[in-house]
Image (tube, rainbow, N blue to C red):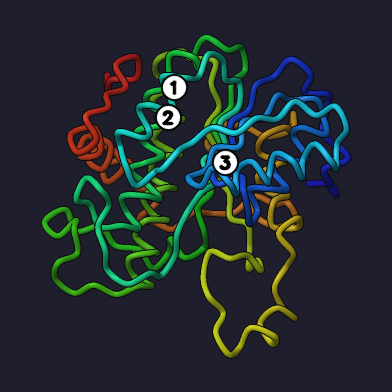
Amino acid sequence: MTTWTPDSMPDLTGKAAIVTGANSGIGLPTALELARHGAHVTVAARDPAKGAEAVARIRTAVPGAQAEYGRLDLSDLASVRRFAEGVRKVDLLVNNAGIAMVPRRETKDGFELQFGTNHLGHFALTGLLLPLLTAAPGARVVTVSSDAHAMGRIDFDNLDLERGYGRMSAYGRSKLANLLFALELQRRAERAGADLSSTAVHPGMTATGIVGLGPFQPLLRLVMKSAAAGAVPSLYAAASPDVRGGEYLGPGPKRLRPSEAARSEDLAARLWDVSEELTGVRFDKFANR
């Protein structure tokens, strides 16, 4: 893979992009670069004030940018549905938002918070937007995972983690679910003959607000990448003509090999079925065949 930077992105004029969590972290530079290259970008975020601020920053950095805010709380399936109902066109969906290593809490629908927000919220959003995505030629779905997925384990008898909750293990589980979903989405798109590409990315160790760095913050920031650098794999997956569906891309950008669990088609299919049941969102066009 040759050296690639966001400057290598093609013209995206006429494309409609949605970036979840685009008010901060790697989501903001992802949305900014997509707008810089001509896409109409929706900053999908929970906090209206922070979302509006992000839109203003994008418009300041890119005069004439097409950017707007859309309220989306991935920990609330009713909010996900309201957001999706307001979307009229989408060519590119970047499932970027996430929380990490928080104390055990639950979403508004009663799911363990990291699994419910990072995976189930994005699963539901993608499913609700599927008719629009499949209607858009060459549509892409990019899902942000992490190398932490390798420590993830999914126990379907303990999905709410009422037994044995650990902040890091719960995060790893949610990132494993992200990767399983992205790869299974590609398999189902291919079986359905849909013109849709699904990829997953690992941003690398990035200095963002997703987790508190505590007293080690000054030291850790010396070895962490900037948010802009962390956004590069997402932008590469979103716009490079060299990307193929089903790939897992990391810093460089370069192609990565998912863990054995993430490559399990049986595990992915079971997670898909459970996710449809839990969210009530069914990918009818992509039913297993």
Q: In the image, residue 170 lies at what x, y percent?
A: 32, 65
Residue drawn at 74 percent across, 28 percent down: 241
What is the secondary structure assignment of the residue under circle 1? Answer: helix
Cα separation, mark 2 vs mark 1, equals: 5 Å
Of the two numbered discs 1 and 3 in the rendering, the one whose residue sits closer to the viewer: 1
Residue drawn at 86 percent across, 36 percent down: 62
The kind of residue tagged 3 is: Glu
What is the secondary structure assignment of the residue under circle 3? Answer: loop
Q: Read off the residue under disc 1.
A: 129
Cα separation, mark 2 vs mark 3, equals: 18 Å
The kind of residue tagged 2 is: Thr
Q: In the image, residue 259 lies at what x, y percent?
A: 44, 58
Q: Read off the residue under disc 3.
A: 247
Of the two numbered discs 2 and 3 in the rendering, the one whose residue sits closer to the viewer: 2
Q: In the image, residue 248 lies at what x, y percent?
A: 56, 47
The kind of residue tagged 1 is: Leu
Q: Considering the image in quadrants, where does the C terminus appear?
A: top left
What is the secondary structure assignment of the residue under circle 2? Answer: helix
Local packing at callout 1 (Cα closer than 10 Å; few below 14, some 14-19, many 20+) is many
Outermost residue toward the front in this view: 49
Q: Is residue 3 left or right of residue 262?
A: right
Q: Read off the residue under disc 2.
A: 126
Where, by quadrant of the figure, is residue 197 drawn?
Answer: top right
